[in-house]
Image (cartoon, rainbow, N blue to C red):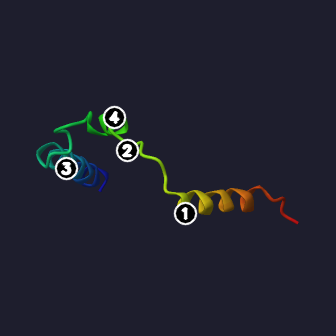
Amino acid sequence: MLLPLSLAFVAMIGGILWWAIFSGQYDDPDHAARSILRDNDTPVPQQFQIISSNLDENQSEPKA
């Protein structure tokens, strides 16, 4: 019983690896690293700055 389960497990792992390689998962492994360098550094609109500052104030209050 243990041998068939082990063989099925190895076949499943092999199938997942086969899928990952041939579905493009490893085509460009550096894309995520480069995307951080290409982020958008434009200023945040004033209305969103007010909202985020209000959120920061609410989080800094001690809980009773």
List the residue tagged with mark 2: 40
Q: In 3D space, how far apart are the residues under numbered discs 4 and 3 (Cα atoms)?
A: 32 Å
User: Which residue lies at the image location 19% right of the left edge and 46% below the top edge?
Assistant: 20
Q: Secondary structure at mark 2?
A: loop
Picture coordinates of residue 30, whole percent (x, y)? 27, 33
Quadrant of the rendered image containing residue 29: top left
Query: Disc 3 residue type?
Result: Ala
Q: Secondary structure at mark 4?
A: helix
Residue identifier under label 3: 11
Looking at the rendered image, the quarter that the C terminus falls into is: bottom right
Work out how far the residue at label 1 is from the one at label 3, CA to CA, in angstroms. Answer: 55 Å
Q: Amino acid at mark 4?
A: Ala
Q: Which residue is mark 1?
A: 47
Q: Tell me: 39 left or right of 45.
A: left
If you read the primary sequence from the N terminus, does the residue marked by circle 3 or circle 2 appear first?
Answer: 3
Of 4 and 13, the residue lying toward us = 13
x%, y% of residue 56? 68, 56
User: Residue 41 appears in which quarter of the rendering?
Assistant: top left
What distance separates the C-alpha of mark 1 from that of mark 4?
31 Å
Whole-angstrom CA distance, mark 2 to mark 1, is 18 Å
